[in-house]
Image: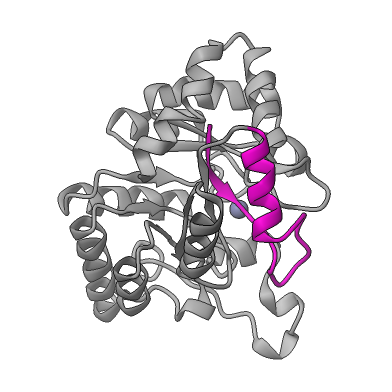
Amino acid sequence: MFDVHVHAAPDVIDRIGYDDQVGEQYAADGFSGFVLKGHQESTVGRAKALARASGLDVVGGIVLNRPAGGINPVSVAATLHSGGRVIWFPTADAHTQESAGLPRLADLQPRLGRAALCTPPVLAANQQQLDDITLILDLIAEFDAVLCTGHLSGDECRWLFDQCQSRGITRFLLTHPSYTVPAMSVAEIGELAEQGAYVEITAYQLWHQPDMTEELLAQVARAAGDRLILASDAGQPNSPPPPLALRELIERLARQGLDHSWLLASASDNPRKLVL
Ligand SMILES: [Zn+2]
């Protein structure tokens, strides 16, 4: 199996373990690898060090939050040229994160202010930002890397998907589109999946998303079809260990009548094909 979304220490909040400890859990469970995600820093160096030490396919990337300089091609170029594979659009600094009252770095340091990041559908007519995004997309296409939508709004995700299609990006993952942010409908998710977007469902949603149900997650999975990607998004001290979290997601969806081998492929072959 291969988990495209996990968090480990060090981080600005508590995590279930350090990179090497989380890596040991995956190895003990027979996983081939995982993508290490950090909201506040590039994980390329951490992932590469762990890949060399463990023999697992540990993959890094960068989230375009404020610590990375926001939505900027410089961080993207540095990440891709040093072997990073995944570029996430803003998460903790997305405007949706602020409006939904989800955790921000400014919660820990109020002196930082609460400025948030938007993409053009929300922040219209900013030519510099449009130029930056165009260059970011061209770099991702050139490296055949993965674009994840982070916590952008549904409108922004759709806009970005259209841009990606016209610029030759094939590895486009909607980050947990049924989560509180961006809260896309099953119909919207199905429409984008049909056009080629990969759709992520996370085990995190089972335990930490208010009002989420297994039934709704199963509907999202059906809408995603062969573009489904199952991930843990675990690493919280109050979630199961990441490999177990992902296995539990598969079992709970199977209980909703979904085909077990398809679910397993969505947490192994499909994510490996997406990322590697
Ligand atoms: Zn996450």
Q: Which residue is drawn at 77% across and 54% down?
A: 16
Q: Residue at x 65, y 86 (%)?
A: 113
Pinpoint residue 2: horizontal percent, then vertical percent.
51, 37
Q: Is any part of residue 151 visible from this angle?
A: no
Queried whether the magenta region covers residue 18, the answer comes back as yes
Pinpoint residue 126: horizontal percent, then vertical percent.
29, 77
Looking at the image, the residue that sits furthest to the right is 238
Q: Is any part of residue 276 visible from this angle?
A: yes
Pinpoint residue 186: horizontal percent, then vertical percent.
50, 29
Judged left or right of residue 41, residue 28 is right
Judged left or right of residue 103, residue 161 is left
If the image is split into quadrants, where does the C terminus sit?
Answer: top left
Colouring of the image? one colour
Looking at the image, the residue that sits furthest to the bottom is 111
Q: Quadrant of residue 131?
A: bottom left
Queried whether the magenta region covers residue 23, the answer comes back as yes
Q: Residue at x 17, y 54 (%)?
A: 167
Pinpoint residue 75: horizontal percent, then vertical percent.
37, 76
**Residue nearer the viewer, 48 or 231:** 48
Q: Which residue is drawn at 27% across and 67% down?
A: 136
**Residue nearer the viewer, 122 or 151:** 151
Judged left or right of residue 226, residue 11 is right
> Which residues are the magenta region?
1-29
**Residue nearer the viewer, 10 or 256:** 10
**Residue nearer the viewer, 27 or 239:** 27
